[in-house]
Image (spheres, helix red, strand yellow):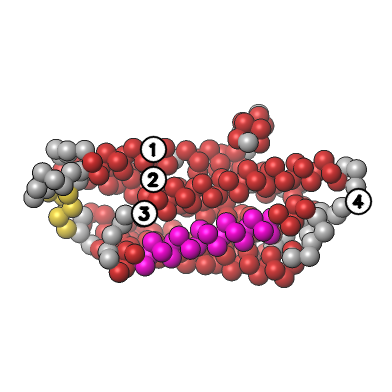
Amino acid sequence: MQVTFIWSRGDWSVGKTLFVLTRYIPFIIIPLALLSAFETNLDVQICETLLYIITILQIVAITLSEVIFGLRAYAMWNRNKAVLVIYCCVAIVYVAAVVFILQLCLPSITFGESPTAMISGCYETGGNSDIFAVFVVIMLVEVVTTTLTLYRAFRYFRHAPNSLSQNMMRGGVFYCVTMLSMSVVNVLLIFLVPTYILTVYQTVMHTMLATRMQLHLRKVDQHTYLVDRFAEESLVPMSFMRSTFLADI
């Protein structure tokens, strides 16, 4: 599906760029996370460098996933200006909050020698635990996207005659609810235990859901287009999809 709907489309575009970055950043995160967790005799400076790289890549990957979901919700609302304003406000608050939290918390995290040889990898000796607030901010962004998607889907797309619209509704609801559920579980786990054991898993799953949604919609869109050439199905209210960059998402 990647070859058919992504790589075979020649020139680079917004959708293709988002797909590639979102899909393949986890292939950098996972080896670094494994190195940080299981490698022995790591220098403190290496551990600090790994922490910064992994954290930044995770934020970038999740943010790109949120962009894909947000653009899809914006498309479902037929480029409604109110929705665009909502997302612009959300984006400003999101970036400001994440940057503030990371600047406050990351420098405070320290590493030291493990008290026992049985504990491998980077051993954290202290730090500001408020970094979990980043995942709370992410969860709140997903609440906005999921709410917009659910309302639009059940209010306008539930009885849509077009297969693209129906698949957009079902897929959008499933992917958004799944994404939000994982974020809620991760935040609760961090708050109650606390442990960051699911953060890499959340990042990887977000990127998989976002890019899988892109592939699925492109597949359905191509099938719908072929069917519509010999039928009278209407793409309303998704008629703009072929004439804007959102069709590439």
Is the Cβ of the residue at disc 2 closer than 8 Å to that at disc 3? no
Mark positioned earlier in the residue sequence (4 or 3): 3
Farthest-out residue, front: 118
Q: Residue at point 51% right, 58% down?
A: 179
The kind of secondary structure element at disc 3 is helix
Is the Cβ of the residue at disc 1 closer than 8 Å to that at disc 2? yes
Q: Amino acid at mark 2?
A: Leu
Measure how far apart labels 2 and 3 are at the Cα level: 12 Å
> Does residue 169 show up magenta in the picture?
yes
Q: Residues within 10 Å of mark 2 (few under 14, many from 20)?
A: some
Q: Residue at point 49% right, 47% down?
A: 207
* Magenta stretch bounds: 168-188
For disc 4, the marked residue is 232
Q: Is residue 1 left or right of residue 136?
A: right
Q: Amino acid at mark 3?
A: Thr
For disc 1, the marked residue is 28
Q: Is residue 176 visible?
A: yes
The vertical placement of 35 against 55, above or below, is: above
Q: Amino acid at mark 1?
A: Ile
Is the Cβ of the residue at disc 4 closer than 8 Å to that at disc 2? no
| Dominant SS type (magenta) | helix
Measure how far apart labels 1 and 3 are at the Cα level: 15 Å
Measure how far apart labels 4 and 2 are at the Cα level: 46 Å
Mark positioned earlier in the residue sequence (1 or 3): 1
Farthest-out residue, left: 115
Residue 46: x %, y % from top left: 21, 39
Q: Amino acid at mark 4?
A: Glu
Mark positioned earlier in the residue sequence (1 or 2): 1
The kind of secondary structure element at disc 4 is loop
Q: Which mark is residue 199?
A: 3
Q: Which mark is residue 38?
A: none
Q: Which mark is residue 57?
A: 2
